Amino acid sequence: MKKDNYLKTNRAFSVVRKYGWLFTVLVAVGGLWQPKLGLLVILIMAALTITSFFTGRYWCGNFCPHGSLFDVIMLPLSRNKKIPDFLYSKAMIVGFFIFFMFNFSRKILKVMQLWGEMVFLDRLGFVFVTTYLMVLIAGGLLAIFISPRTWCRFCPMGSMQKMSFNLGKALGIAQKTERRLTITNQEQCLSCGKCARVCPFQLTPYLEFSGQNQFDNIDCIKCATCVAHCPVGILSFTKDRSS
Ligand code: SF4
Ligand code: SF4
């Protein structure tokens, strides 16, 4: 595929994906005045950890409010360039996860000292508000100057989901519940590469289908953008066939 030959196509196929970005703005900006709004992020973190145990990064492609912001608001503004390899290298993903978690835990522990005081919930909420705002600003800039989902390639919440998914697989549960991108028949594939050109994560499914005609990539966010735009309509999601 030619470098930077990515397409800006519709990625928001549900109400949640079309308007989820409003939640990001509500928490990241509204939370500056109403810090308790940040407490809603605890529910988001719990939900993404639980869903990923069963079905990998499905949350990122279907429910994440920041993902909605990147795909709906930022996509038209984005240069839509290739995401540099180093931004999703193992060193970057692991290093950023440790850095993020260290800072986040440090702030939470500091707020915990206020347990029982009137200001506790406001201060706790504010930690989540500033984290949400930081992702909005940093992720938004990366979205404009590189590609909408650049942040997502090393997002600590994505790493958490991968850990949860690996646990689900180790326990033999995720194999029964995950739905994977599947090609009906590899012989019908035109090798046009459109599935890769529209993929928000810049993955290349058409080059990686297994013997079972499935795409086994832990970073696939199951957003179905490739399914919607494959010219011959041979992509869909089906249960894991490898087990
Ligand atoms: S978009 Fe469809 S036809 Fe084109 S390469 Fe991908 S799977 Fe094959
Ligand atoms: S491979 Fe398809 S479903 Fe997976 S992230 Fe890319 S576009 Fe979405």
Image: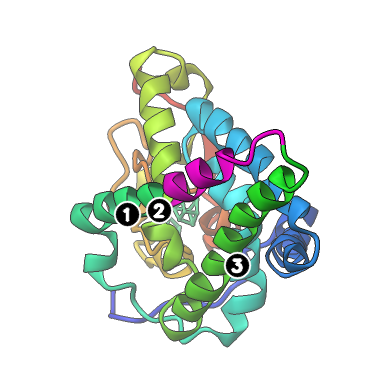
- Relative to 205, is 7 above or below? below
Residue plotted at (72% across, 70% down): 29
Residue plotted at (64% across, 47% down): 124
**Magenta residues, as a range?**
103-116
Judged from the image, the secondary structure of the residue bearing numbered disc 1 is: helix
Q: Report the predominant secondary structure element of the magenta stretch.
A: helix
What residue would you read off at disc 1?
Answer: 99
Q: Are marks 1 and 2 in contact (CB under 8 Å)?
A: yes
- Relative to 215, is 233 above or below? below
Q: Amino acid at mark 2?
A: Asn
What residue would you read off at disc 3?
Answer: 133
Which quadrant of the view contains residue 241?
top left
In the picture, measured across the screen, residue 157 lies left or right of residue 121, that is: left
In the picture, measured across the screen, residue 16 lies left or right of residue 140, that is: right
What residue would you read off at disc 2?
Answer: 103
Give the camera-side residue of 6 and 142.
142
Graded by Cα atoms within 10 Å as few (under 14), some (14 to 19) or many (20 or more), the crowding at tag 3 reads some
Residue 180 location in percent, x, y? Answer: 47, 36
| Marked residue nearer the N-terminal end (2 or 3) | 2
Q: Amino acid at mark 3?
A: Leu
